[in-house]
């Protein structure tokens, strides 16, 4: 019970310190699925744990990623990877549904 309490408190304090960013603990962020776009893998109201990473080289076609689009967080599968004019990776994603 103590580990669950410590994780909950870490998430709670993180949300107070950085209100615009989902809280994370030990490099993972819990997010609630808001649509059926990834069904049947993830259904609406499922809880997913997102592994935080800033290394684009780890992502490949078929990987599931979560990214911010406006005020929402989107979880989709990578369908295509291209490069922009500066050589940065550009991901085309799509839900499974």
Image (cartoon, grey):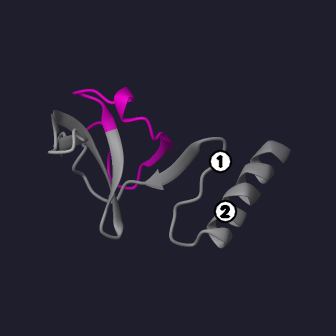
Q: Main secondary structure of the magenta part?
A: loop
- Are there few (<14), some (14-19), or many (20+) residues within 10 Å of tag 1? some
| N-term mark: 1 or 2 | 2
Q: Secondary structure at mark 2?
A: helix
| Residue 39 found in image quarter | top left
| Residue occupying the point 65% across, 47% down | 25
Depth order, front residue of 59/95: 59
Q: Nearer the viewer, residue 95 or 57?
A: 57
Q: Are marks 1 and 2 in contact (CB under 8 Å)?
A: yes
- Find residue 51 and name its label: none
At 50% from the left edge and 42% from the top edge, which residue is drawn?
52
Across and down, in percent, residue 68 comes to 35, 58
Q: Residue at the location (66% across, 62% down)?
A: 14
Picture coordinates of residue 3, whole percent (x, y): 80, 43
The region drawn magenta spans 40-64
Q: Residues within 10 Å of mark 2 (few under 14, many from 20)?
A: some
Q: Would you say residue 1 is visible in this rendering?
A: no
Picture quarter containing residue 80?
Answer: top left
Looking at the image, the residue that sits furthest to the right is 2
Say above or below: 82 vs 73.
above
Q: Which mark is residue 14?
A: 2
Q: Which residue is mark 1?
A: 25
Which residue occupies the extreme front position in the image? 86
């Amino acid at each position: 019970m103590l580990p669950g309490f410590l994780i909950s408190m870490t998430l709670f304090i993180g949300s107070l310190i950085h209100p615009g960013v989902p809280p994370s603990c030990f490099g993972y962020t819990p997010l609630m699925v808001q649509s059926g776009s990834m069904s049947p893998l993830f259904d609406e109201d499922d809880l997913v744990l997102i592994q935080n990473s800033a290394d684009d080289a780890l992502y490949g076609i078929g990987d599931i990623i979560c990214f911010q689009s406006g005020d929402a967080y989107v979880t989709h599968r990578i369908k295509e990877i291209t490069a922009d004019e500066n050589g940065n990776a550009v991901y085309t994603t799509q839900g499974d549904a």
